Amino acid sequence: MKVYALLGVFLFFGCSIASAQDTTATQNSLRSGTITSQFEYIYRVSNNIREHEVVKKSHLEQLKANVLDSIRTRTKEITQLQTQIGSLNDSMTLVKQLLSTEVEQKNQAIASGDNFTFFGITIQKTVYSSLMWILVVVLAGALGFFAMQYFRSFGRIKKAEKDFLEVQEEFEQHRKNTLDRERKLKRELINAQMGKN
């Protein structure tokens, strides 16, 4: 009988240890791993009675708690991601507004760099440059025209001076001739008067 008692004690402790290992394995398997692996574990440890699975209620409750915890965690992650997406969208909107403002300021700076005020009138630099070149060409043309007129006048003046000198020379010559004739006539007159007296 002692053998039966001893055998009974060993069986009792063996079943307890097996049950404890099974519970520990169940808890370890239900407490870790993915939801899919937890479902597979429950499917493996379930009893099959005439094509109906018998599942321990504690396993289902643990699985339900794990699924709900996973859903809560995912919901929190989704909420955080949506918040981050919202803040990123706000940031992108702000950056787009700043970019459009900067682009507009750049365009205004370029436009103001291409324009300036001249006698109270806003003029583009290209128009101003064209007007200045036209003014330079007109002034150069006027300078050329007046230089040509000056040189023509200078030539005429030189010719007139030359003609004047020739006329003056002729006049001097004529005056000398006239003086000589006058002297001759006076001498003849004096001689004629002396010859009568």
Image (spheres, rainbow, N blue to C red):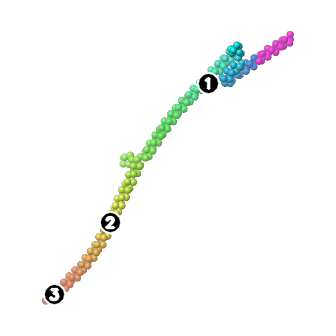
How many marks the image carries: the answer is: 3
Q: Residues within 10 Å of mark 2 (few under 14, many from 20)?
A: few
- Contact flag, marks 1 and 2 (Cβ < 8 Å): no
Instruction: Please give the range of residues in magenta.
Output: 1-18
Element on which disc 2 rests: helix
Query: What residue do we see at 34% from left, 59% from top?
Result: 142
Q: Which residue is at the far right?
A: 2
Q: Provide the residue designation for mark 2.
A: 152
The percent coordinates of residue 170 (x first, y second) are 26, 77
Q: Which residue is at the far top?
A: 1
The answer, for residue 180, to whether it is visible in the render is yes
- Contact flag, marks 1 and 3 (Cβ < 8 Å): no
Q: Provide the residue designation for mark 3.
A: 192
Q: Nearer the viewer, mark 3 or mark 2?
A: 2
User: Quick check: is 38 in the magenta stretch?
Assistant: no
Q: Provide the residue designation for mark 1.
A: 73
- Tell me which label, 3 or 2, sits earlier in the chain: 2
The percent coordinates of residue 169 (x first, y second) are 27, 76
Q: Nearer the viewer, mark 1 or mark 2?
A: 2
Element on which disc 3 rests: helix
- Tell me which label, 1 or 3, sits earlier in the chain: 1
Question: Quarter holding the N terminus?
Answer: top right
- Contact flag, marks 3 and 2 (Cβ < 8 Å): no
Q: Which residue is at the far front?
A: 51
